[in-house]
Image (cartoon, helix red, strand yellow):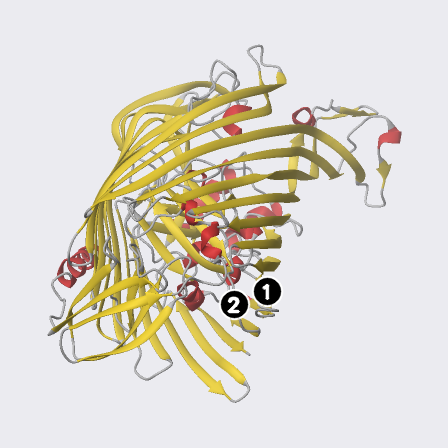
Amino acid sequence: MVKKRWLFLALALVGPLVTWAQHRMSIKVVDKQTQRPLAGATVGLEGSLASAQTNLNGSVQFKNLKEGTYRVQVRYLGYKTINQTIDISADESMQIALAPQAFLADEVVVNGTRANANSATTYKNVSQKELAKNNLGQDLPYLLEQTPGVVSYSDAGAGVGYTGLRIRGSDPTRINVTVNGIPYNDSESMGSFFVNLPDFASSVDNIQIQRGVGTSTNGAGAFGASINIQTNTRRDTAYAELDNSYGSFNTWKNTVRLGTGLIDNQFTVDGRLSRIQSDGFIDRGASDLKSFFLSGAWYGNKSLVRANVFSGKEKTYQAWNGVPEEKLFGTPDDIEGFIAANGLEGKDAENIRQANPRTYNSFLYQNQNDNYQQDHYQLLYSTTAINKLTLNGALHYTRGSGYYEEYKAGEKYTDYGLNPVVIGDSTLKKTDLVRERWLSNYFYGLTYSAEYKANDRLNLTLGGAYNRYKGDHYGDITWSRNPLFTAVENYTSAPDNSFQTAYRYYFNKATKNDFNVFGKGDYRIGNVGLFADLQYRRVSYSFLGYDRNLNNVQQQVELNFFNPKVGISYQLANNSMAYASYSIGNKEPVRDDYENSTPDSRPKAERMQDIELGYRLGGTQFNAGFNAYAMFYKNQLILTGQINDVGAQTRMNVPDSYRMGVEADVKWQPIPAFYWALTGAWSQNKIKNFVEYINIYDENWEVADQQINALGRTDIALSPSFVGSSELSYRPIADTEIAFISKYVSRQYLDNTSDQERSLDAFFVNNLRLSYQLRFKGVKHIGLSLLVNNIFNEKYESNGYTYSSIYEGDPTVYTNNFYFPQAGTNFLLGLHVGF
């Protein structure tokens, strides 16, 4: 807890460290042709943290400036960006005129679902430059780790392969992800699998993370956050870039990026090809990832057309079982007890005895791989042909197909819909087998928005989407040690007495239609901004599930959601603002919730009320965002252990739960060569009245009953009460950076019981980043980067799971905890060459 207090103290002390200087500078931004003031233009002073938006009079003021030379940058959508050098030796007042841009900028594509500096929304923008600093091979969740409230995790332990992130304790199924405004979350599971888009950050221009419900967007409901990704934007000059990285665990990343620049003042073509390979920290936790990105655009003075085609292909050895507690923390006797309790023998028993406790992987089968390919096609169109009106539309299509293969020992024939096999006088009830579980899906639709800027006070947006998902789910047995059928013609004998088969033991289809429409507007009265956002969403889902007679039949549900949002902001004189908002979000259950229940036990949709209060401050040496939030859930879906009427442990609704907390995002830059960035997120995440259900098994390992424990107010699983980060950056000479990066995450409970015996210990991890830029004739730049992760070799686990059981006649509750250890000290060394 000392480390936690240290971060808290740092945040408290940084606030008053603003260096007061002598001068002020007032800037008024106007339209060059009409001389009309431009409200909402962004004005920044390069080399400092100062950035602000102009008021209704087109004016902005910077105070406490030291004497010296400043480079002022002024940006406004639809106008050419101005960079101007100004010498400050006394108070200055100046006017900057922006000329209308000769082409439509890519930013309009995502503008309809984005928050801006005057929005009553809690958000964080991450630029391509910030992403590139750490983009040496790890997946996107690890590149976002320094943003408030984010906890990332990796199955293979080193940030390559299967990774994920939680924001405010909310898991990936509750985080809405869009790419150019197009939904990315899987329509059925609601998760976002970044392993299917390896090295995607190399084609990203910027990311906005909105915490809480946020603004209306497309796709799955945002229940903890939304991640809005915009891919590459216009580059006027031709370029070629090579990125190569090598690091621990035989990790390689190779990336080639090419671009034509602007052709005939209208066309651009950009492309990327990437490969990432890693053996992983966990035994056999290897990943082989490939991807490409191709984009072509046409720019007119009032219209824009962009076509994107991108794809990812992954082959990842499974490491999703984790390490049992007995192996990670126990004695040899504990390990022997685990072996006996789980019936391990032969190579499996020797594996758990001999493996390194922190790298143990229970899987030994050589092809225990996950294989999946996902191809994306996007056609984006924007136009401002009608005065004051911007129209955006996008067509999209995603094709996904793949499977995971696994070896299963001693499987019952009846579990696969087969009868026991009789050979002579012998009856075979079980067999060893290899199976593949397949997904083959299609996702397509359209998104649109119309933005009407009536005047400097009023903006209106109408938007929405219609998307359709079609997915086939099926499983094949590809090999069995014993025959699957008694009829000889159904199998062939092999020299090793094994039997080949291609038996399909299940097949079902799912279809989901997702329609939404939203309207929002913001209106300014002096320094006060008013905001309203109303969304209607309709979901229709057809799936294979149990009916009231426990027959597996095709079923359908239809859900209608209304998601209103209102907010108010107040612009203060010192380039700061305060805001408050109230939002309601609704979210449907996931596939497993529907598939493993009946209409009588089917869970209800979740509902959340989100209250956000915040303050943002921008200065030349210090900027900060502070906010408080309260998210109140009705019918939140969680695992309780309760068995429903079809014998499944699906998620159940809990009537009342909440997340409440405060967040800080602070950056201090006393001199141009040094900055300190800090984030902190303190929270309480509670279920008001939690009831735990524990299975009681009979001698045949069948569930005979359940023990019920009423536990009252408990913590929500995997929701730390504190998450903090720090980045200290120093540039001792030009083109050189030394950065010390820290991350602290407090205790996380593996389930909802608040039992410390079922939890992840707090961890404090520190990384070191070194970079140096070189320039040679004929080469634009050469960049060398070294990222040393976990430099103090902290032994920690960032994810895990647990389950408990009781056996008839024995009142003891046996709890099994599993953990995902993360790598100790490791490195990534990168070389970037730009032409």
Q: Mark 2 points at which residue?
A: 235
Give the distance between the C-alpha atoms of the residues marked 1 and 2, in whole angstroms: 8 Å
Label placed on residue 268: 1
The amino acid type, in three-letter code, at marker 2 is Arg
**Residue 192, above or below 430:** below
Which residue is drawn at the image coordinates 55% and 55% (left, top)? 285
**Residue 431, quarter of picture:** top right
Which residue is drawn at the image coordinates 49% and 81% (left, top)? 782
**Residue 618, quarter of picture:** bottom left
Judged from the image, the secondary structure of the residue bearing numbered disc 2 is: loop
**Residue 6, above or below 192:** below
> Picture coordinates of residue 748 (x, y %)?
32, 44
Tags 1 and 2 in contact by the CB under 8 Å rule? yes
Q: What crowding class fits label 1: few (fewer than 14 Cα within 10 Å), some (14-19), or many (20 or more)?
A: many
> Picture coordinates of residue 614 (x, y %)?
21, 46
Locate residue 571 relative to residue 352 in the image: left or right: left
Furthest toward the front, the residue is 34
Q: Nearer the viewer, residue 294 or 102?
A: 102
Which residue is drawn at the image coordinates 46% and 29% (left, top)? 537
Q: In which quarter of the image is the C terminus?
A: bottom right
Locate residue 88 relative to residue 176 in the image: left or right: left
> Picture coordinates of residue 331 (x, y %)?
40, 50
Q: What crowding class fits label 2: few (fewer than 14 Cα within 10 Å), some (14-19), or many (20 or more)?
A: some
Residue 584 in sight in this render: no
Judged from the image, the secondary structure of the residue bearing numbered disc 1 is: strand
